[in-house]
């Protein structure tokens, strides 16, 4: 019985292994929010960081400002008129490819966190510390962490982009769970 179960598991893995294969996409990208792109017909979520939601507001110099829109603008400026290369294998719960992306040889994910328009979410903690200390972007004022803001506004919780999150994504993709 155990042998049949193991063979069944191996068969499921074999049939779905292409769903967790790494993908590389290259071309002109369009920013869709502060941590997402559309590239080569695929929706991409930048791995290792989290940016404010489009409708999220933050506070700076005593006034509210649309930090979600500013994060979108920051990403759009980085990818404007340049070829972007993204690589990743994971899919998030929305079907977006989790990827690390580069433009002109520079790590877009890291740039967003260094400039303060995204927070570390499983990677880039050093870049976040630098942005926080320098008071760049979001760190120039007060804001709710994007994950907390989503949870307060009815959004789905997302796993951090760390090793545990990668393993959970792998299992979810492999067995076809949403």
Image (cartoon, rainbow, N blue to C red):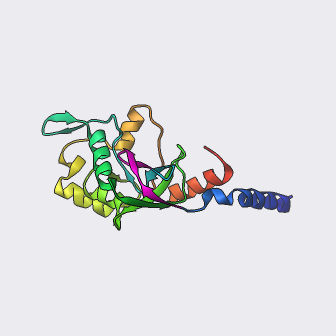
The x and y percentages for residue 100 are 43, 60
Q: Count the marks.
A: 0
Q: Is residue 130 magenta?
A: no
Question: Which quadrant holds the C terminus?
Answer: top right
Which residue is at the front of the view, 76 or 65?
Answer: 76
The x and y percentages for residue 135 are 18, 53
Which residue is at the front of the view, 168 or 136?
Answer: 136
Q: Residue at x 66, y 54 (%)?
A: 174
Q: Residue furthest bottom?
A: 105
Q: Which image quarter: residue 144?
A: top left
Which residue is at the front of the view, 109 or 168?
Answer: 109
Left or right: where 105 falls relative to 156:
left
The x and y percentages for residue 147 are 39, 43
Q: Which residues are magenta?
A: 24-38
Q: Residue at x 33, y 34 (%)?
A: 55
Q: Residue at x 45, y 35 (%)?
A: 155
Q: Residue furthest top?
A: 153
Left or right: where 85 falls relative to 136:
right
Q: Is residue 35 magenta?
A: yes
Q: Residue furthest front?
A: 81
In the image, residue 49 sits, relative to residue 150, either above or below, namely below
Question: Which quadrant holds the N terminus?
Answer: bottom right
Prevailing SS of the magenta stretch: strand
């Amino acid at each position: 019985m155990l042998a049949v179960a193991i063979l069944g598991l191996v068969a499921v893995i074999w049939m779905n292994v292409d769903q967790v294969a790494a993908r590389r996409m290259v071309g002109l990208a369009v920013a869709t929010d502060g941590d997402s792109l559309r590239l080569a017909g695929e929706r991409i979520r930048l791995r290792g960081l989290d940016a404010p939601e489009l409708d999220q507001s933050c506070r700076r110099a005593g006034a509210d400002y649309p930090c979600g829109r500013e994060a979108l603008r920051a990403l759009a400026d980085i990818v404007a008129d340049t070829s972007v290369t993204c690589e990743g294998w994971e899919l998030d719960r929305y079907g977006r490819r989790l990827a690390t992306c580069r433009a002109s040889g520079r790590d877009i994910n890291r740039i967003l966190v260094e400039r303060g328009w995204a927070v570390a979410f499983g990677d880039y903690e050093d870049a976040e510390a630098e942005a926080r200390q320098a008071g760049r972007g979001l760190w120039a004022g007060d804001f709710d962490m994007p994950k907390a803001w989503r949870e307060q506004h009815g959004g789905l919780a997302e796993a951090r982009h760390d090793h545990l999150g990668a393993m959970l994504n792998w299992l979810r993709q492999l067995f076809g769970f949403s």
